[in-house]
Image (spheres, rainbow, N blue to C red):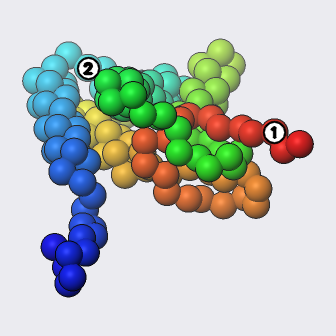
Amino acid sequence: MGRAGQRTPVAIGSGRDVLANIIEWLCIALVGAVAFLVSGRLPESLGLGYLLNFSAALFLGQGIVRDLTIYYRAKKRAEPMDNAKGEAAICLESSLGILVIAVGAVMMIGALGPDVQIAKRVWPLMVVGIMLFGWACKDIVIKLQPLRLAIEKDHANIKFSWKS
């Protein structure tokens, strides 16, 4: 409590946000540990298109799990999931993931791009790096009018509103 009974804002977020972040970090560490355990069975050479699709699938998969937990929490509390204030916006995480999947698919279908050599010890680092990047950009949205990046917690993937 601040002066005269006013609440002091917490920079990290609410207790629920901190707990959600800790759980996500633990999940990232767990997936990294699993990647370390299976890294001996993973390929040492992979086409760039396949590597891009793997990376984007991991990135989007993490986002889907997070979105489902946000949806479940909002539904449980009977709160609206979307707080975009009527502005057209697209989730940066979803946009990047879909773009990388599209580029990777074109590269795979057209047999474009080089083979990438990946050492066994790099796989877990790459997995953890991708997931940490996903965590870092989870609250960023691309606002379309005017074009800019903004931070919105627990946002929907796409939010469009029509002005009358």
The residue at the point 89 percent across, 42 percent down is 164
What amino acid type is highlighted by mark number 1?
Answer: Trp
The residue at the point 76 percent across, 60 percent down is 146
* Gap between marks 2 and 1 measured at Cα: 48 Å
Q: Does residue 55 lie above or below 152 as drawn?
A: above
Q: Which one is in front in this view, the residue at disc 2 or the one at disc 1?
A: 1
The residue at the point 32 percent across, 39 percent down is 131
Q: Nearer the viewer, residue 161 or 96?
A: 161
Residue that label 1 marks = 162
Residue 63 seen from this side: no
Q: Earlier in the sequence, mark 2 or mark 1?
A: 2
The residue at the far right in this view is 164
Q: Does residue 148 lie above or below 126 as drawn?
A: below
Query: Residue 128 location in percent, x, y?
Result: 25, 40
Query: Residue 92 location in percent, x, y?
Result: 55, 45
Asked if the residue at tag 1 contacts the one at tag 2, i.e. Cβ–Cβ closer than 8 Å, the answer is no
The residue at the point 21 percent across, 82 percent down is 4
Tell me which corner region of the image, top left, top right, bottom left or bottom right, holds residue 66.
top left
- Crowd tier of the residue under label 1, counting other residues whose Cα lies within 10 Å: few below 14, some 14–19, many 20 or above: few
Q: Which mark is residue 42?
A: 2
Residue 33 seen from this side: yes
In this rendering, position of residue 95 left or right of residue 34: right
Q: Nearer the viewer, residue 81 or 110?
A: 81
Which element carries disc 1, helix, strand or loop?
loop
Tell me which corner region of the image, top left, top right, bottom left or bottom right, holds residue 109.
top right
Which element carries disc 2, helix, strand or loop?
loop
The residue at the far front in this view is 4
